Image (cartoon, rainbow, N blue to C red):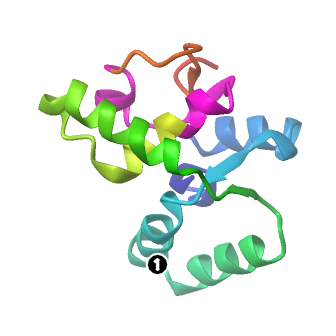
Amino acid sequence: MVALLDRGARDHETLRDAYELRPGEWILPWAILPELDYIAAARLGRRVAAALREDLARGRFTIEWGRLADLRRAEELNVSYRSLRLGLVDGVVMAVAERLRARAIATVDLRDFGAVSLKGQPQLWPRDL
């Protein structure tokens, strides 16, 4: 999502094009929202962070608010891949992707997402585009 927001990011155009083809298919797990807001403000500025919050409030992105089972699966992944130190956010993103049978996960974090074997084997964008 940061690369989607950052016009200067190496993968911005690729992800923007993918988003514009099917914006309704992009689902944001709740766990990324605080981190995304913080990173947007810290790296891209308050105006970008404010625009993101406005887009979220207007429903431009679908937010998946999750289930208890997502937290359980996230913890299973954290235990199974202990050496990666996935944490809550990555674990929840992966759990939600599995539950929703996501076709792809938009991430540049290939160290973690590329090392974990997820049910349904979602693509990793932009790597797999």
> Where is residue 4 drawn, in percent x and y?
62, 51
> Where is residue 91 drawn, in percent x and y?
38, 41
Relative to 40, residue 12 above or below: above
Q: Which residue is located at x 42 percent, y 35 percent?
A: 73
> Where is residue 35 drawn, in percent x and y?
42, 66
The residue labelled by disc 1 is 41
The magenta span reads 96-115
Check the picture and name the quadrant holding the C terminus: top right
129 or 79, which lies in front?
79
Q: Can residue 107 be seen by looking at this rendering?
A: no
Relative to 46, residue 22 above or below: above
Instruction: Categorize mark 1 by other alpha carbons within 10 Å: few (<14), some (14-19), many (20+).
Output: some
Q: Left or right: where does residue 9 sit relative to residue 120?
A: left
Q: Is residue 22 magenta?
A: no
Q: Is residue 105 magenta?
A: yes
85 or 76, which lies in front?
76
Q: Which residue is located at x 60 percent, y 84 percent?
A: 47
Q: Which residue is located at x 72 percent, y 71 percent?
A: 56
| Element at label 1 | helix
